[in-house]
Amino acid sequence: MLNYSIRRVLSAIPTLLVLVIASFLMIKAAPGGPFTSERPLPPQVLANIEARYGLDQPEWKQLWDYVTGILFNFDFGPSFKFKDRDVNDIIAQGFPVTLTYGTLSFLVASTVGIALGVAAAIRHNTWLDYLAVGISFAAQALPNFVMAPLLVLIFTYKLGWLPGGGWYGGQWQYLILPVAALSTSYMATIARITRSSMLEVLHSNYIRTAAAKGLPARSIIWRHAFKPAMMPVVSYLGPVFVYMITGSVFVDIYFSTGGLGRAYVNSALSRDYAVLLGVTVLYGVLTIAFNLITDLIYGWLDPKIRY
Amino acid sequence: MKPSEKMNDLADVITDTTVIQGRSLWRDARLRFFRNKAAVTSVFTLLAVILFILIGPQFAVWSNEEIDWAIMADIAGSGMPTVENGHYFGVDSLGRDLFSRTIQATRTSLLVGVIGAAVALVIGTLYGTVSGFAGGWVDNAMMRSVDILIAIPATLIIILLMVMFERSFFMLFVGIGIVSWLSMSRIVRGQTLTLKNREFVEAARAAGVGPFTIITRHIIPNLLGIVVVYASLLVPEMILTESFISFLGLGVQEPNTSLGALISEGAGTISYGTLWQLMYPLFFFIITIVSMFFIGDGLRDALDPKDR
């Protein structure tokens, strides 16, 4: 187990390097730059600015400085657009917000989804089952950018119960709509996967044995069926986390929550490469870390997996 | 009875047996698919949507680019959906006919979905079969690189591409194409691994058939079922991705539009009471996505060898 974990962590390193290098090259290959403007700067001024940010160096040197800066000083460099802020500041400001509602959405989607799926499987072919399947099918066509305007329409304009945006330090009224918008479609998919996996497990031989032995239903479901049934669900949770990260880009813009997503799109539009690269790398690290955790949990759930 | 008579009897028995019509995999799958009510309903829904795109423009009074100056000043009032002034779906926030805009947007979204899935299908199948069939270090290297690419948040890469380069249809297809084939190639490779050790492939190899012919004639036809299923599930996913990016304003640009862009416009104007600007595009978006999911599900039930 420990051996496997170390190997997995090591194998994440090339992934990260590819991510950094690919984003770096893509940004360099794109036309335009942070200092191109309608009125061209005098060449001497431009040269000075570029020297200030190290852009006069050859590209491999820039890349090298960037990577070593992150590795050894945890420094993502200065922002090209905001003279008094560096990328670390921008991330430190936006990331806690994204993390707060992202984690909440993830928890809501997985707990509600799993509960719904298990309930539907236990009450197979009853109204509860049909309701759960119906909801999860409908919710699949309601991704965050469809849910958000609908929720705002109902709860802000029609009922006037909840604010349609803003953050204010993450008070609960401001959290509900973003979390609901972000989690609905994943909740649906999780419920669907849980239901079909649970049904499959409940029809297997050892469950029949347990029932024949006279074990109570609760013990069969939670002690014997639940853990193996969770395996496909857990392997889906990794991707869900990634989708939530990208979905947070949307939530930040639509609900003006002030998270990293807004900084991401704004920096891309204003060609603030430093912020853009920094946020991409951060998202990449999170993705890889979460895939790793998923794999480790998967190994714990399935004793057949040997490392 | 002499041996020869016995032989003749036996021959009679053999030749007498009525020929049982064998059920091919595809015939079987078709039967199963048509028994699935949700899937069949979805096929008709999707056909209706396609029909709407094709013949809808014949009924449109206004084109998608014309601005109706007469009602532009009072969109929330006289811009409502009516039959009288020819704006069946009302007008958008600039006074353009929403009926024509919705047709245009649905067409774009379907196109994006189909082309994205087709790119994934071609690249993913080729990559996966080559990797699985080659085996050894080639397979290892090819699959490790897929592992690396798959760990990168795809939508972020598309956003980067769209922002950094010109926002055109071409770039959108490139972006979606880059990320869509990855999981397809994984699935195909897994199937190829099990197929390549089967007897018929061995027989082909023993008969001196080259690797290229084995792949195209023996491996790929046997993969088709799972590939079709997966591609059909990719279409709505591609539409969702494109709509998401267009909603952010980074996808398809004016005067072109897609369902994501229209939903975004409609969502931006709900405070003025022009609900139809959100609801019509949303309706087409939801029925398209839902019916595609049902069709994909039906195809999976029909073709998935695991269930047989």
Image: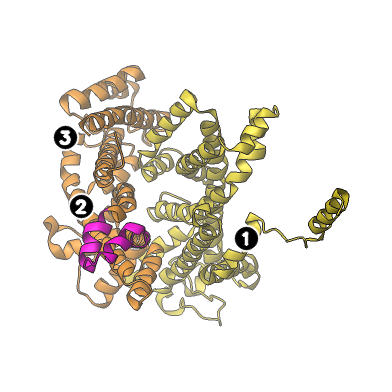
Chain colours: A orange, B yellow
SS at circle 1:
helix
Looking at the image, is A59 positioned above or below residue A274? above
Q: Earlier in the sequence, mark 2 or mark 3?
A: 3
* Left or right: where A109 falls relative to B80: left
Residue at x 33%, y 31% (from the top left corner):
A15
Taking the magenta stretch, the answer to whether it contains residue A207 is yes
Return the mark for residue A84: 3
Looking at the image, is B256 positioned above or below residue B60? above
Looking at the image, is B212 positioned above or below residue A122? above
Kind of residue at badge 2: Thr
SS at circle 3:
loop
Circles 1, 3 touching at the beta carbon (< 8 Å): no
Residue B275 visible in the shown view: yes
Give the distance between the C-alpha atoms of the residues marked 2 and 1, in whole angstroms.
Answer: 46 Å
Kind of residue at badge 3: Asp
Find disc 1 in the rendering and name its residue: B28
Residue B120, position in %: x, y?
52, 44
For discs 2 and 3, the disc positioned in front in the rendered view = 2
For the residue pair A271 and B21, the one nearer the viewer reads as B21
Taking the magenta stretch, the answer to whether it contains residue B199 is no
Q: Identify the residue at the far front of this view.
A: B1
Disc 2 sits on a residue from what chain?
Answer: A
Looking at the image, is B87 positioned above or below residue A94? below
Disc 3 sits on a residue from what chain?
Answer: A
Residue count near mark 3 (Cα–Cα under 10 Å), binned few <14, some 14–19, many ≥20: few
Q: Which residues are magenta?
A: A200-227
Find disc 2 in the rendering and name its residue: A103
Give the distance between the C-alpha atoms of the residues marked 2 and 3, in whole angstroms.
Answer: 31 Å
For discs 1 and 3, the disc positioned in front in the rendered view = 1
Residue A161, position in %: x, y?
19, 74
Residue A91, position in %: x, y?
19, 40
